[in-house]
Each structure stands twice: as C-alpha cells, then as structure tokens.
Image (tube, rainbow, N blue to C red):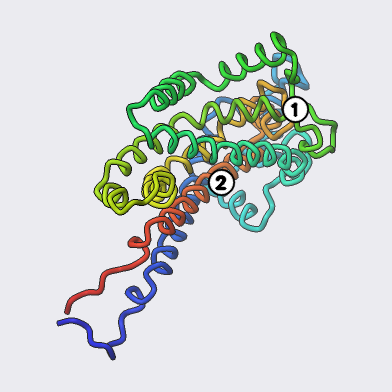
Amino acid sequence: MNSGPGTRLPWRDRFPLCRHLAGRLLGAVVVVAAASVVIFGAMQLLPGDAADVLLAKGAGSGGGTAAQKAALRAELGLDRPLPERYLDWISGVLQGDLGRSVFSGRPVTEIIASRLLNTLTLAAVATAVLIPVAIGFGAWSGARAGHARDRAVTITAVIVGALPEFVTATLLIAVFAYAWPVLPAVSMPDPGANPLSAPEALVLPVLTLVAVMAPQTIRMVRAQMAEAMASDYVRMARLHGVGERRIVTHHALRNALAPAVPLLAGSITWLVGGIVVVETVFNYPGISADLIHAIGHRDLPYVQSVTLLFAVTTVIGYLLADLIVMALVPKLRSRPRRIR
C-alpha cells in the first residue's frame, strides 16, 4: 500500500541527495586510499633506490661498497619492511607532513609549495578556456548537424585531437615563436612573480592544453546536442512557436550537457598528467621539472606525494562532475517512494 500522509519516510527516502553524496564521498575516500597503496607499491618496483643514486654521485660509477650501501639504506630507512614504511608515509600525509626530500633535505611540502602556484595558475587558465570552447563549439556544431559548420568542426576536432601534446606544442612554437614571432617560445616568468604578471608566457602552453583536451569533449557535446535537437520535445517547442535560439539554450543544451560533463571532467583530470609534458616542453617553472628530477634520482617521498596529489585531484574532479550532473538532471535528485 502507498505510504499515508502521516507516515514517516525512512531517512534514505527523505534525503536522497544527502545519501547519494555520502556514498560518493565514501567511495572517493576508498579510491584515494587504494591509490596510495598502488602509488607506494609502484615506486618500490623502480630499479635501484636513492642509496644507489647518492653513492653513484659520491663515488663515481662504482657506487660505493656493499657496507656503505647498507649503512646508507639504514640511514634513509630503506631497509625497513614495506608495510612499516607505507604506514609511516601515509600517517605523515594525513597529518600534513609529506616527508623530506632525500637529496635536498627540505620538506616536500615546502618544495611543492614553491612551484605549485605556477602549475595551478596554468591549469586554472587552461580550464577556464577549455570549458566555454568545448561546450560552445560542440553546441554550435550539433545545433546544425549535417551542415557545413558541423562537418568543419568535426573534421578539425578529429585532426587536432589526433596529435600528441608535444607535437601540438612544437607546431605552435614553430608558427607563433619563429614563423610569426609574436609569442615567446618558452614560458619563464620572473622568479617569485605571479605567472599572470606575464600573460603572454601562458598563451602557448594554454593553447596546447586546450587543443589536446577540447576535441573529444566537443565531439561528445556535438553528438548529444544533435540527438537533443532531433527529439520530440524540441519538435513540440517549435510547433508552439519557441524561437530557435531559446530552444538551443534553454532546452537542448541542458540535456546535451549531462552526458558530456563526466567526459569534460575526465579531460580536466587528464590535465593533471598532460601538464607535465607541456611544462617540460615550454620550460615552464611548475612542479614538473622537480618531479622529473625526483623520478630520475629515486626521491620517493617527493614522487609519491606529488603522484598522490594528482590522484586526489582526479577523484575530486569526478566527484564534482557527478554533482553537476545531478544538478542538470533533476530526476536524479529524487528517489521514488516505495510501495508497501
């Protein structure tokens, strides 16, 4: 029988959005915990360790004696059991202590903070450009599916999306720094200065990131938009005299965005990895240079912490995408009442 007016519904039926959010947050915590285990384990599979690198630098190609290596491994804590080392690292992370760099001796938090603002600025500017470009071109193309502009956008997206980021970066440098020298080939703001104080240095890195991330999202938005424009509710809106622009912006676009948001979130989280390549190509002073140096020198506390930071950013991106989809599709926020 149906629940009567005076029947008190269970908590999960009265607050479906809270229940959904709690489940997603719990899932995010589990994913991050699993990622920390995978990251730590993967670092242990790398050949050699920090003791080998330090001894090689100090003693030449011979790398020191076995006794020296054993003593250095004990000093660095590399001779401790893996579970103990993992628990020590992750407990420090939970307390905000990422450990110390094996080579510089500086706190990892301090090293990351010195360059993190530059990386975040580049990522934020690229995201701010990506979202309107991907949604705008996708909607503009899908609103007139099969027409010349649709074919032009689709072909361009396929060609640009097929190029790796380092190829796109090289082409942009060749065109805008050498053939038509209007932008710098490298992006090196003054030390300690905000990257936004030299916006011309951000143009080519941002264009590279957007060119790599946007094509797939454009094609997804275009496909969903074309499907929405051919739907029954759009036909009914036209029969009732609703203008084409209002149909696109108030009816079709909202329904086209919901399936594209997770893909857009995936593009933004790809930015976490792709930005390493772009920063390297343009010699941009972000965290990538330190990360590559740390990998080569087996500076595990730094590598593990930065990789975990990337993983957390990815999980947060998908969590926000899930919430945006719920905002775009109201029926996902409600839970049908059970019939008893």
Q: Amino acid at mark 2?
A: Thr
Q: Measuring from the top left, give residue 211's x and y in whole percent.
A: 54, 26
Q: Measuring from the top left, give residue 185's x and y in whole percent.
A: 73, 18
* Residue at 41% in and 25% down: 154
Q: Measuring from the top left, give residue 184's x and y in whole percent.
A: 75, 20
Q: Is residue 294 left or right of residue 81?
A: right
User: SS at mark 2?
Assistant: helix
| Dot in front, 1 or 2 | 1
Viewer-closest of 109 and 328: 328
* Residue at 36% in and 40% down: 225
Residue 223 position (above or below residue 332): above
* Residue at 46% in and 54% down: 324
Q: Which residue is mark 1?
A: 201
Viewer-closest of 310 and 226: 226
Residue 228 position (above or below residue 168): below
Residue 293 position (above or below residue 253): above
Q: Residue furthest front?
A: 241
Q: Measuring from the top left, give residue 62's x and y in whole percent.
A: 70, 15
Image quadrant of residue 194? top right
Q: Quadrant of the C terminus?
A: bottom left
Residue 81 showing in the rendered view: yes
Q: Quadrant of the N terminus?
A: bottom left
Q: Residue furthest left?
A: 1
Q: Residue furthest bottom?
A: 6
User: SS at mark 1?
Assistant: helix
**Other-residue count near label 2 (Cα within 10 Å), few / some / many at <14 / 14–19 / ≥20:** some
Q: Is residue 159 left or right of residue 301?
A: left
Using the numbered discs, state the Cα–Cα distance from disc 1 to disc 2 in whole angstroms: 25 Å
Q: Which residue is mark 2?
A: 313
* Residue at 56% in and 35% down: 271
Viewer-closest of 187 and 105: 187
Q: Is residue 223 left or right of residue 64?
A: left
